[in-house]
Image: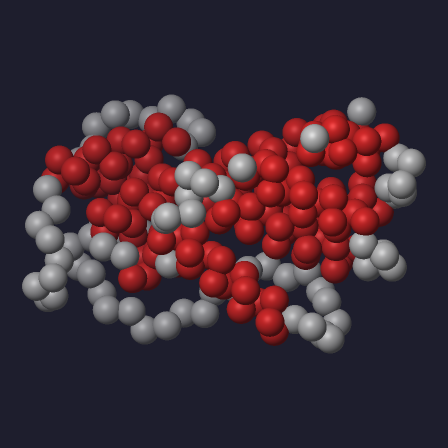
Amino acid sequence: MQALHFLQALARIARAAPKPAHSARTRQIRHAAYASMAHSSRSSRRTWSRALLHRLRQRQQQRPGRLLTVRRRVRIVTPITSRPEEPARAETLRQLVPGGRGMEYCNLLEETADYVQCLRAQVQLMQTLLDAFSS
Amino acid sequence: MSSRRRRITDGEINELITKLQSLLPEPRRRNTNRASASKLLKETCSYIKSLHREVEDLSDRLSDIIETMDGDSPQVEIIRSLLN
């Protein structure tokens, strides 16, 4: 389902007229990539996928009318209660996995594994499409 | 501090850490003591960041390709056939 969702989004982006600027289109494609990951049937019940969808929707609502530039995903650091029983780096991981901050450590690891698998699948999908389009 | 937190066994943590290990691109040692758990988390963070960068880069390149596409492009046919 991840692939289908992404392809449909890509087709919509390709059909858009008038054609958006390159940077705007890049942003749309990136948005579609993360949305496809979150919508995939394996992941839709995951905390990370709900958190990601929420973040994507928030971004969409902020966007209209602004000059669009491609920027890296910026994380806003909020005060977090320290968790001394966790290994170091767990905190960084919490910031990288959507919704990670509120998770129990055990859930964080599980969600991370799922998130990584989804990310890899998305990257492979996009690479495959690129190869298909470039041949 | 919170009493809501259920008691997580070391076994469960180790299992998940092993699973994460298997997802990382390079083969690692299999022991899961605390020091290597932290190292594994560090590598996982690096890996996730690199995957995010790849999504960014691939989005950019797909954007390039789509720019040159019109209704007659073979790429459009590929998309159509994949969707049917």
Q: Is residue B10 above or below residue A75?
A: above
Give the residue at x 60% y 43%. A5
Please name whichever residue, A131 or A95, is drawn nearer the observer in this view of the structure.
Answer: A131
Q: Position of residue B9 (x, y in %)?
A: 10, 42
Q: Is residue B15 left or right of residue A112?
A: left
Q: Is residue A116 visible?
A: no
Q: Is residue A45 left or right of residue B72?
A: left
Q: Position of residue A102 (x, y in %)?
A: 29, 62
Q: Identify the image quadrant of the C terminus of chain A.
A: top right
Return the residue found at the far front. B84
Q: Place residue B81 in its image quadrant.
A: top right
Question: What is the image's colouring?
Answer: secondary structure
Q: Is residue B49 above or below residue A78?
A: above
Give the residue at x 69% y 34%. B83
Give the residue at x 13% y 58%. B5
Q: Identify the image quadrant of the N terminus of chain A.
A: top right
